[in-house]
Amino acid sequence: MPSSRPRLRAPADTCDCGIHIYDTTTAIAATAATNGPPWATTSAYRSVQQKLGTTRVVVVQPTAYGTDNRCTVAAIADLGLDRARGIAVVDTTFSPQALRALHDAGIRGARFQMLKGGALPWEMLEPVAALIAPMGWHIQLQMDGRLLPDREDMLARLPCNVMIDHVGKFPEPVSPDHSGFQTVLRLLDRGNFWFKLAAAYEVSRAGPPHYDDVGALAKIAAQRFPERMVWASNWPHVAVATPPDDAMLLDLLLDWVPDAALRERILVQNPRILFEFSQESRN
């Protein structure tokens, strides 16, 4: 995998807010579209951290394992609870005790991946949101952003924070005036919606180094709502045959967010709030 040194010097306590860890001993869920690479271990990811200068991370439950969160919980423990948090996949069969155990293990959100291979249907979203809201968790939502207008009313009713993943995830890159992106902006304006600057390479037609078609959306969102932006590498990039350079993905923020103070907010302060990291630096 390519991974040069980034031009952007990561501030202390920079958080990569979305990676996946895989374990070949964990059974693949019946709903899964694919498994991940066997080399995507915590040890391999530590090498990425060393090159990028990041120290905090959010491990997102892969769709491969459905609601079996053991691999993700083990990864958080291995990376260290002082530096790692996680996003689980849970449904309404999870008891309050099971959710509390996940919380104590570092989980701070519930993933809904509404594309191929996702484990849960739309009908599960509102009930799960009601279950996790008392613990302060958020919903991490990945869907075809072009369909966001159809789901806007339901999403606005959710009683918790919501993270819109992958720069809105528009499989066909759209212009800023597209109804789906305008829905993103309206939701962000509500105050409980967040936005993840990640995975532009999955959908961009403009390509590197700046992925200008996706970047145009990222720049607008980051300028208007910097207090609810986070960044993620999306390592190990399972959706593409040729993985991007992780350093280049961090350097995107030099173009998307030119202001250094806002970049630090996105990389450090916002994740600290959303994922409940300590304010004390561990570098």
Image (cartoon, helix red, strand yellow):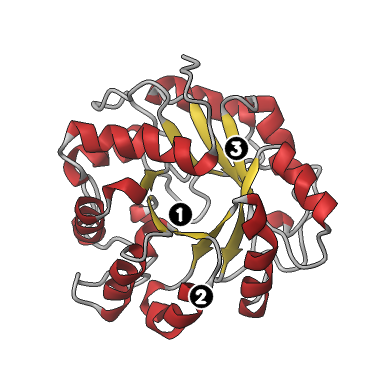
In the image, 226 versus 11, the foreground residue is: 226
In space, the residues marked 1 and 2 are separated at their CA atoms by 34 Å
Q: Quadrant of the N terminus?
A: top left
Crowdedness of circle 1 by 10 Å Cα count: few (<14), some, many (20+)? few
Give the residue at x 35% y 53%: 201
Mark nearer the viewer, 3 or 1: 3
In the image, is residue 153 above or below residue 126?
below
Question: What residue did someone put label 2 on?
Answer: 157
> What amino acid does circle 1 point to?
Val
* Nearest to N terminus: mark 2 or mark 3: 3
Residue at label 3? 85
Q: Residue furthest top?
A: 283
Element marked by disc 3: strand
Q: Nearer the viewer, mark 1 or mark 2?
A: 2
- Name the N-terminal-most of marks 3 and 1: 3
Q: Which mark is residue 240?
A: 1
